[in-house]
Structure formats: C-alpha cells, structure tokens
Image (cartoon, rainbow, N blue to C red):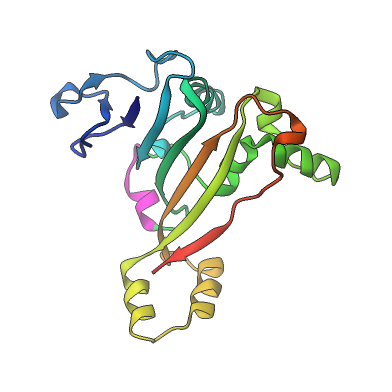
Amino acid sequence: MRLNLGCGSRKLTGWVNVDRFPGCQPDQVVDLEQLPWPWADNSIEEIQLVHVLEHLGQTPERYLAIIGELYRICAPDAKIFIVVPHPRHDSVLTDPTHVRPITAEGLAMFSQARNRRLQAANCANTPLGLMLGIDLDVEKAELVLDPAWRQRLSRGEVTPAQVNEAVRERYNVVESSHIVLRVVKGATPADTPATSPSTDQKS
C-alpha cells in the first residue's frame, strides 16, 4: 500500500489519498494528529508528505509520536517522500498552521547509525533514533531554489558558489526542501551503514 498523506486536492493515482477534511474527497478520512493511525504495522511501502509534516505535532511529544507512527506502519526499506518549506523562506511565516521548521538534519537525528557514530565521537547530539526505537536513513536531501534565484542562476548572474554562500547567509534563497527517508528495520548495528544526509541544490 502507498499513502499520500494530507493529500488535499493533490490526488495520486494508485495511492490511498488521505486527508482529515472530507470536503477534498480523499479515499480515506484520517486526522493524522489522532494516534494511533488506522494502518497495520509494516503495511506501507511508500508514503508522501508534501507540505504536510510542518503542520503536524505542535508539541515535541506529539511530533515524536507522529514520527513513531510513520515508522510503525512502514515496511522494511519503505520510502518516505517529504516536501517542506525551507526554514529561512517567507513561506514558513505566512501560514499560521505551520508549527515547526523541518530540516534534513533534524530528520537525520532518527538514524540509529548516525546516532552511534556521533556517540562514538562524543558529540553533543540527541540520539532520537536510539531513544525512541526509530531508524530512518536520510537517503536524499535536495534544496529547491526560490524562483528568483533559479532565474538569476540560469541567466549566469550568479555562480553556483555564490548561490551556496547565499544559502548559508540569506533568507528567501531556498524555497523548499525535498527529502527521501528509507525505513530501516531488522538490521543489526553492524549491518546499518553509518551515512549522513547529503544536500544538493536543484536549479
């Protein structure tokens, strides 16, 4: 089964389109803030959360519980596709229902391999994956530039190096982040690769 969570009007053929509002005519009406979710353990092969995760879990406890539900319902090696506004873009501030910024680095805190690697290096990093029994590997993290910066780059007005510098220092350079998580289940610590997320820019 493949779930398109918080689908709104963006329906996908071959997916179970899920939303809390009956008015958008989803295949299944589910409030993702209400736990547990109505899907069985290890039953989902793919999930899409397109401009959804930043709306969920206003308290840390509820957010972590929602991440736990994502992990519970996913089969081993399932993929979770996430699109969120970049935390330094005005679109984060525009919508009053946004409850937290979502970053690839924050989601990488649910990787047990990364938790162990940072623990071994005596780094001060909360090992959320180990603490919660969750294991999510960030397979891909892509930054999508704001249209104005995409145009400047395509016209040759700025170089990729200048864009990279602007991403670190300015607001409204990156519009959104596209993140792919792989669900890790059934692996021993020795079997789990110690990888960290890589971030590319989409122009």
Please name whichever residue, 110 or 61, is drawn nearer the observer in this view of the structure.
Answer: 110
Single out the residue that lies furthest toward the front. 191
Q: Give the range drawn in magenta.
A: 90-97
Please name whichever residue, 40 or 176, is drawn nearer the observer in this view of the structure.
Answer: 40
Please name whichever residue, 129 or 95, is drawn nearer the observer in this view of the structure.
Answer: 129
- Residue 202 at x, y percent in the picture: 41, 65
Residue at 39%, 79% in the rendered image: 153
- Which quarter of the image is occupied by the C terminus? bottom left
Q: Is the magenta stretch mostly helix, strand or loop?
A: helix
Q: Can residue 46 be seen in this view?
A: yes
Q: Is residue 70 above or below residue 147?
A: above
Q: Can residue 126 be seen in this view?
A: no
Q: Does the magenta stretch include residue 16?
A: no
Left or right placement of residue 4 versus residue 124 in this view? left
- Residue 62 at x, y percent in the picture: 51, 23
Q: Is residue 26 above or below residue 203?
A: above
Q: Is residue 34 above or below residue 63?
A: above
Residue at 65%, 50% in the rendered image: 196
Quadrant of res 124: top right
- Residue 50 at x, y percent in the picture: 34, 42
Left or right placement of residue 196 versus residue 43 in this view? right
Residue at 24%, 19% in the rendered image: 28
